[in-house]
């Protein structure tokens, strides 16, 4: 009888010890995995924010259609201004502005085009810097501003994404191709009566943490909801301007 009791007590002790270990290990493993996964989710959210901001700069509004957003990235050109040279403090104090300097340079280029019968920018700039009276009078030798159109994806994301893999940004990592949730509010009006387009892109904890410990996930969601915070990661807001910030920032 005593032997049986001892065996049962030993089993009970081992069971309790296992529970104690698990009560510590499970939360630690959950948080470690969550941290790793959220770094990848944030990377996509930042890429999507960049795309939305560029989309609005060209079209005047945000979009909730992520497929359209990808198509925009693949097909729309990116307008950029290549800059060479800068105005000096003395020029600025004398009333010269960037806008005025560009106007002088562009007028000089048109005169040079007619004279040289060429549209080659390098030739035109070399000529006007050396010969155009107005350019020289205003000290704009070496001042150059050219508007060029480049590949949108390469311009926004350097070597991070290409046309072949850009679609990855609309899917939540660690899911079976679940798309980020996207919402827009293009009719929001601030206190001054000015319309301010808004967007929000988000990923709920249930998506990228869906295969982890259920109780830990429920506890995390409950904690965020009690604090009146979104239970997951998101960027932007449709309730009011927040500078398109992410809730991890």
Image: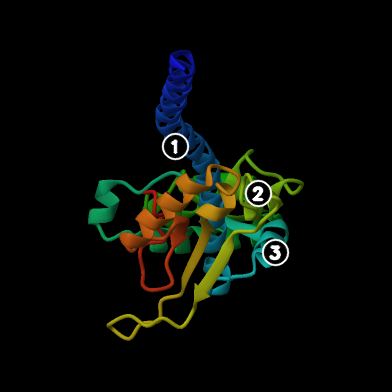
Residue 204 visible from this viewpoint:
yes
Residue in view at x 38 percent, y 53 percent: 137
Disc on the earlier residue, 1 or 3: 1
Q: Residues within 10 Å of mark 1 (few under 14, many from 20)?
A: few
Disc 1 target residue = 31
> Horizontal placement of 55 versus 225: left or right?
right
Q: Residue 215 location in percent, x, y?
A: 48, 47
Residue in view at x 63 percent, y 51 percent: 169
Task: List the single residue furthest toward the bottom.
Answer: 193
Q: Is residue 42 above or below residue 133?
A: above
Q: Secondary structure at mark 1?
A: helix
Residue in view at x 25 percent, y 49 percent: 90
Residue in view at x 46 percent, y 64 percent: 103
Quarter of the image where one finds residue 189: bottom left
C-alpha span from label 1 to label 3: 32 Å
> Horizontal placement of 113 versus 190: left or right?
right
Tally the marks.
Answer: 3
| Pointer 1 with pointer 3, Cβ within 8 A | no
Q: Residue 244 location in percent, x, y?
A: 42, 61
Between marks 1 and 3 in the image, the one whose residue lies nearer the viewer:
1
Disc 2 target residue = 175
Depth check, front residue: 136 or 246 = 246
What label sits on residue 67 in the rendered view? 3
Between marks 2 and 3 in the image, the one whose residue lies nearer the viewer:
2
Depth check, front residue: 174 or 73 = 174
């Amino acid at each position: 009888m005593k032997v049986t009791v001892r065996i049962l007590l030993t089993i009970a002790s081992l069971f309790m010890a296992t529970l104690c270990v698990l009560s510590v290990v499970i939360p630690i493993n959950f948080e470690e995995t969550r941290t790793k996964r959220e770094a990848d989710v944030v990377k996509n959210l930042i890429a999507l924010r960049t795309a939305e901001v560029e989309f609005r700069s060209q079209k005047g509004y945000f979009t909730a259609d992520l497929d359209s957003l990808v198509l925009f990235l693949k097909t729309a050109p990116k307008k950029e201004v290549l800059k060479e040279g800068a105005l000096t403090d003395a020029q600025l104090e004398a009333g010269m502005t960037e806008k005025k300097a560009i106007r002088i340079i562009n007028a000089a280029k048109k005169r040079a085009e007619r004279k040289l019968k060429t549209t080659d920018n390098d030739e035109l700039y070399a000529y006007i810097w050396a010969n155009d009276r107005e350019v020289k009078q205003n000290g704009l030798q070496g001042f150059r501003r050219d508007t060029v159109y480049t590949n949108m994806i390469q311009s926004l994301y350097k070597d991070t994404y290409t046309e072949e893999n850009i679609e990855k940004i609309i899917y939540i990592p660690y899911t079976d191709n679940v798309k980020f949730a996207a919402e827009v509010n293009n009719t929001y009006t601030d206190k001054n009566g000015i319309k301010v387009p808004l967007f929000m892109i988000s990923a709920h904890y249930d998506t990228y943490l869906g295969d982890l410990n259920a109780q830990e996930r429920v506890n995390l969601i409950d904690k965020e909801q009690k604090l009146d915070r979104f239970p997951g990661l998101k960027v932007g807001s449709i309730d009011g301007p927040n500078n398109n910030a992410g809730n991890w920032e």
